[in-house]
Amino acid sequence: GNSVTQMEGPVTLSEEAFLTINCTYTATGYPSLFWYVQYPGEGLQLLLKATKADDKGSNKGFEATYRKETTSFHLEKGSVQVSDSAVYFCALSVGRDDKIIFGKGTRLHILP
Amino acid sequence: GAVVSQHPSRVICKSGTSVKIECRSLDFQATTMFWYRQFPKQSLMLMATSNEGSKATYEQGVEKDKFLINHASLTLSTLTVTSAHPEDSSFYICSAVLRGGAGLGEQYFGPGTRLTVT
């Protein structure tokens, strides 16, 4: 079946540190891949996405590359800020029914 | 940008009563909306797909008689938790799909509703 596995948190980093949150997937067919972010007290927001192999999604300094050979979509940011503290969800969608399958989420704490 | 609202944001009800949660797409029409349930420190679990003008499609293991979904218009879907019990306490999140022509639509999420059943 289709599933997403992402590293468990919480992840605690100091401001300006380099961030990697690992995400791997299993899917039938050719999924689109997403990273969503949930800030405290808010709903999920799409952070970035990639729809085919080797695509790189980027937004707000975050990047993730769709790696078909390793079935991965790791999230990276070169220099995190306190305002990046949130829960990050890796997700995939296969087919045309718009259903999204989420990973369990990774809580990120950035210390000033 | 596309905005999805949910009402109420928090609700406390007594065991055995029913609770209705509304999900609205404020500035776009959505033929498809989704309802999720989020447990503490866990992922979002898709409960059902809400289709305007037709019956909802429920995921395996979700009781359709307990979680009634009505997609009354292109901007409104409601989730009614019937005969609620403490184990139904959770964070319920909806999303609405914005389609731009043919192809995969983009989901916009509501802020969620915290249900506590006492």
Image (cartoon, coloured by chain):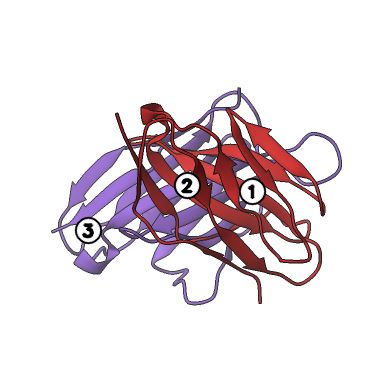
Residue in the picture at 58% in, 38% down: A46
Judging from the image, what secondary structure is the residue with disc 3 in? Answer: loop
Note the chain letter of the purple one.
Answer: B
Report crowding for label 1: few under 14, some 14 to 19, many 20 or more residues within 10 A (C-alpha). Answer: many
Pointer 2 and pointer 3 on the same chain: no
Q: Chain of mark 2?
A: A
Q: Nearer the viewer, residue A23 or B8?
A: A23
Q: Chain of mark 1?
A: A
Report crowding for label 2: few under 14, some 14 to 19, many 20 or more residues within 10 A (C-alpha). Answer: many
Marks 1 and 2, how far apart in space?
10 Å
Which is more N-terminal, label 2 or label 1?
1
Q: Residue B17: which numbered mark, if any?
A: 3
Residue in the picture at 33% in, 62% down: B82
Marks 2 and 3, how far apart in space?
34 Å
Of the 4 image quadrants, the one containing the C terminus of chain A is top left
Q: Nearer the viewer, residue A60 or B6?
A: A60
Q: Residue A34: which numbered mark, if any?
A: 1
Instruction: Answer with the quarter of the image where residue A59 lies.
Output: top right
Of the 4 image quadrants, the one containing the N terminus of chain A is bottom right
Residue in the picture at 21% in, 53% down: B116
What x and y, as percent, mark residue A105?
A: 45, 55
